[in-house]
Image (cartoon, rainbow, N blue to C red):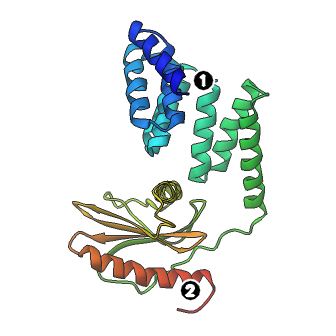
């Protein structure tokens, strides 16, 4: 691998306009040199902005860097340039699966399979998504309830979702006072997986909480159970330590509700 990267780097240096940057970017990505891969991919995109494969390589680098939204946009651009690009169809199908949108995931993966019926990775992904869709269809409709009735004070939103990004209880509104629960729930599932992957790579063990502080407020994400995620949104005036205590209280209520116990 090292010799391949050295040779590809030398070739690209001799001819900066060469499409060898596609191979070099992918080789660096596979080796785990994400920053170097991103630099190669971006430089190639600047020279070849209308090349679908260039956007596809960059999207895969972005996924490895944990930038899911930018990867989605890069794959969306790939499909604008080449609507039946297998790599982008697989990539976006994977993202929709993570978001919990199984229908959209199936649509993209089935299109990818129609382009290349021999692609083993697409076949495997389709089996996984179809199995998830069958399980979801066989399950009773998830109960939603005001799990957090009685929680008052500086709470601005408490949301309980399952590990597939479906709302189980609570509510959440954005700055325009619009219901944001479903959209946020879908992203939470992906954020949880990224946190788990990062913690594993760093040898930190299982993650317990994600804390975000912004100019308008705080967010606290935790896992009340192995199958659920809890998001708490509080006003900026509440100290982070107090937010953690409030989230702990909400987590206890969520666990009790999930286990069918009275609070």
Along the viewing direction, whichever of 48 and 81 lies nearer the viewer? 48
Q: Position of residue 7 (x, y in %)?
A: 49, 16
Residue drawn at x 44%, y 36% as measured from the top left: 33
Whether 148 is drawn above or below 206: the answer is: below
Residue 223 to residue 178: above or below: below
Q: Is residue 89 above or below residue 246?
A: above
Left or right: residue 228 compared with residue 102: left
Could you give the CA–CA distance between mark 2 and mark 1, rounded to whole angstroms?
47 Å
- 44 vs 143, left or right, is left
Residue extending farthest front: 3
Please state which of residues 12 and 93 is positioned toward the viewer in this rendering: 12
Question: Which element carries disc 1, helix, strand or loop?
Answer: loop
Across and down, in percent, residue 152 comes to 34, 83
Please name the residue shown 49% across and 84% down the image: 253
Query: Which residue bears the numbered disc 1?
Result: 83
- Left-right relation of 137 to 105: right
Q: Is residue 254 visible?
A: yes
Quarter of the image for residue 156 reads: bottom left
Q: Secondary structure at mark 2?
A: helix
Please state the horizontal and vertical placement of residue 154, each as a whole percent of the image.
29, 78
Q: Residue furthest top?
A: 15
Q: How many marks?
A: 2
Residue 48 at x, y percent in the picture: 43, 14
Residue 180 disc label: none
Residue 16 visible from this viewpoint: no
Q: Residue at x 56, y 27 (%)?
A: 1
Q: Which residue is mark 2?
A: 256
């Amino acid at each position: 691998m090292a010799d391949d990267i050295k040779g590809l780097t030398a070739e690209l240096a001799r001819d900066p306009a060469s499409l060898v940057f596609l191979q070099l970017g992918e080789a660096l990505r596979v080796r785990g040199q994400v920053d170097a891969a991103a630099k190669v991919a971006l430089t190639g995109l600047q020279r070849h902005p209308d090349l679908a494969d260039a956007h596809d390589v960059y999207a895969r680098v972005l996924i490895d860097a944990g930038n899911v939204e930018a990867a989605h946009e890069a794959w969306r651009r790939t499909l604008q340039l080449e609507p039946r690009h297998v790599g982008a169809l697989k990539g976006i199908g994977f993202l929709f699966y993570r978001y919990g949108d199984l229908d959209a995931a199936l649509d993209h993966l089935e299109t990818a399979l129609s382009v290349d019926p021999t692609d083993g990775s697409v076949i495997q992904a389709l089996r996984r998504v179809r199995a998830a869709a069958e399980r979801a269809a066989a399950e009773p409709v998830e109960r939603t309830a005001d799990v957090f009735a009685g929680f008052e004070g500086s709470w601005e939103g408490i949301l309980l979702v399952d590990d597939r990004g479906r709302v189980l209880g609570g509510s959440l509104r954005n700055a325009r006072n619009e219901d944001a629960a479903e959209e946020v729930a879908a992203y939470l599932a992906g954020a949880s997986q990224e946190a788990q992957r990062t913690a594993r790579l760093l040898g930190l063990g299982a993650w317990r909480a994600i804390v975000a502080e912004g100019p308008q407020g705080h967010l606290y994400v935790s896992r009340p159970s192995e199958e659920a995620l809890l998001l708490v949104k509080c006003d900026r005036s509440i100290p982070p330590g107090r937010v953690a205590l409030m989230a702990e209280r909400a987590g206890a209520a969520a666990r009790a509700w999930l286990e069918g116990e009275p609070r």
